[in-house]
Image (cartoon, rainbow, N blue to C red):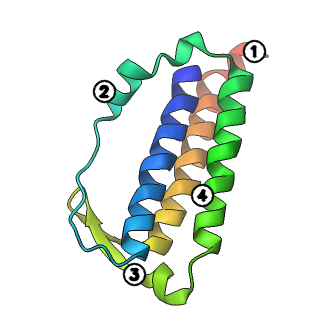
Amino acid sequence: MKEVWQHIIDNERVQAYRALRFARNDQSTLPGYDQGLFNLHAVANRRTIADLLEEFRAVRLSSIALFESCDDRMLMAEGTCNGVRISVLGLGFVLAGHQVHHERILEERYFPLLA
């Protein structure tokens, strides 16, 4: 469970960085990232769930501030990352949807074990 939350945090940072670059009209093609490599070096299991959730809260608030700072033109700006063309607004949906996706997986796989 800790590794999943660390993955959500790391992915949010990557997607927000991409959104920032595209919102500022950077047309550089951005590479993908190796989730497994990030996970291997994150040592999430040494952290508490409370610590991870606090970090997620801080990262999410930062992401919200980034997207709130964008005007309509910035939100519709597009760029290419990992071979996919996507808008800043689209990356915002990726952020939110990615968290929901993994929360559902946690609920399905782990929470029934707690019942």
Q: Quadrant of residue 5?
A: top right
Amino acid type at circle 3 is Ala
Task: Tell me the distance, in whole angstroms, between the alpha carbons under discs 3 and 2.
Answer: 30 Å
Residue nearest the observer in this picture, 28 or 35: 28
Q: Position of residue 105 (x, y in %)?
A: 57, 34
Report which residue position mark 3 lands on: 77
Q: Which residue is mark 2?
A: 37
Instruction: Determine the residue positioned at 43% across, 57% down.
Output: 17
Check residue 63 in the rendering and tell me which mark sits there, or answer none.
4
Q: Is residue 59 visible?
A: yes
**On the picture, is 1 further left or further right than 14?**
right
Q: Is residue 36 above or below residue 57?
A: above
User: Percent x, y for residue 114?
Assistant: 75, 15
- The first of marks 4 and 2 along the sequence is 2
Residue beneath disc 1:
114
Please, is residue 51 above or below residue 72 in the view? Answer: above
Question: Residue reaching furthest right?
Answer: 115
Local secondary structure at mark 3 = loop
Q: Nearer the viewer, mark 2 or mark 1?
A: 2
Q: CA distance from mark 4 to mark 2?
A: 23 Å
Q: Nearer the viewer, residue 96 or 42?
A: 42
Tell me: 40 left or right of 103.
Answer: left
Circle nearer the viewer, 4 or 1: 4
Mark 3, residues whose alpha carbon is within 10 Å: few (<14), some, or many (≥20)?
Answer: many
> How far, Cα to Cα, is label 4 from label 1?
32 Å
Amino acid residing under circle 4 = Ser
Q: Is residue 1 visible?
A: no
Q: Quadrant of the C terminus?
A: top right
Residue 111 sits above or below residue 107 on the image: above
Task: Give the quarter of the figure containing the N terminus.
Answer: top right
Dot 2 lies on which element?
Answer: helix
Residue, far bottom:
73
